[in-house]
Image: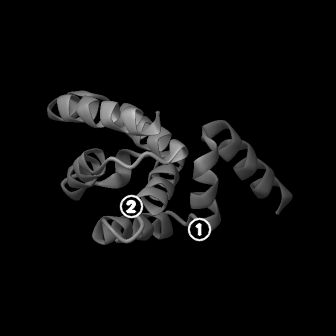
Amino acid sequence: SRTDLARTLDTAFGYCLPFYHAMPVGFVLMIVFLCARRGFRNDRLLTSVSDYFAHTSFSSLSDFELCSLSWAYQSLAQDDFRDFQKLLTEEVTNRGLSPADVKRGQHGIFLWRESTVSFNSSG
């Protein structure tokens, strides 16, 4: 059931959180993205990722990673993590990306790239 899966994920995140610093950032972002796609909110995971980026710049993230992370926090965190969402929004704006780019972040990198190329080539 959905509840059992949520409990299993929570246990797994609790076990893995101490090791996130050793994992590639892209892997952790993929977990956040997949949770958001399925509507699974895990506060331990969201807190861990927001704490990590509170001490690190977003410069290592690709535009897609930034947009998908921003979309994930908008859809999962809603009013929680406001300060982190503000940092994400500022970085999106600083890079010249739009809210539409963030929204497309929910579709995965291949569709995001395709729609970006189509959009840029039509203008």
Q: Which mark is residue 99?
A: 1
Question: Regarding mark 1 in the picture, which secondary structure is present there?
Answer: helix
Is 59 in front, or is 40?
Answer: 40
Q: Are marks 1 and 2 in contact (CB under 8 Å)?
A: no
Q: Residues within 10 Å of mark 1 (few under 14, many from 20)?
A: some
Disc 2 marks which residue? 77
Residue under the image location 47 percent in, 53 percent down: 72
Residue at image coords 59%, 68%: 99
x and y percent of residue 67 in the render? Answer: 51, 54
Compare residues 105 and 45 and report the one nearer the observer.
45
Left or right of 110? Residue 67 is: left
Using a 10 Å C-alpha cutoff, classify the residue at mark 2 as few (fewer than 14 neighbours), some (14 to 19) or many (20 or more). Answer: some
Which quadrant holds the C terminus?
bottom right
Mark 1 residue type: Pro
Q: Position of residue 48 (x, y in %)?
A: 23, 47
Number of on-image labels: 2
Q: Is residue 90 visible?
A: yes
Q: Residue furthest right?
A: 122
> Residue at (32%, 47%) from the top-left corner?
42
Q: Nearer the viewer, residue 56 or 100?
A: 100
Is residue 7 left or right of 67 when viewed as pictured?
Answer: left
Q: Which mark is first along the chain, 2 or 1?
A: 2
Residue kind at label 2, given as amino acid type: Ala
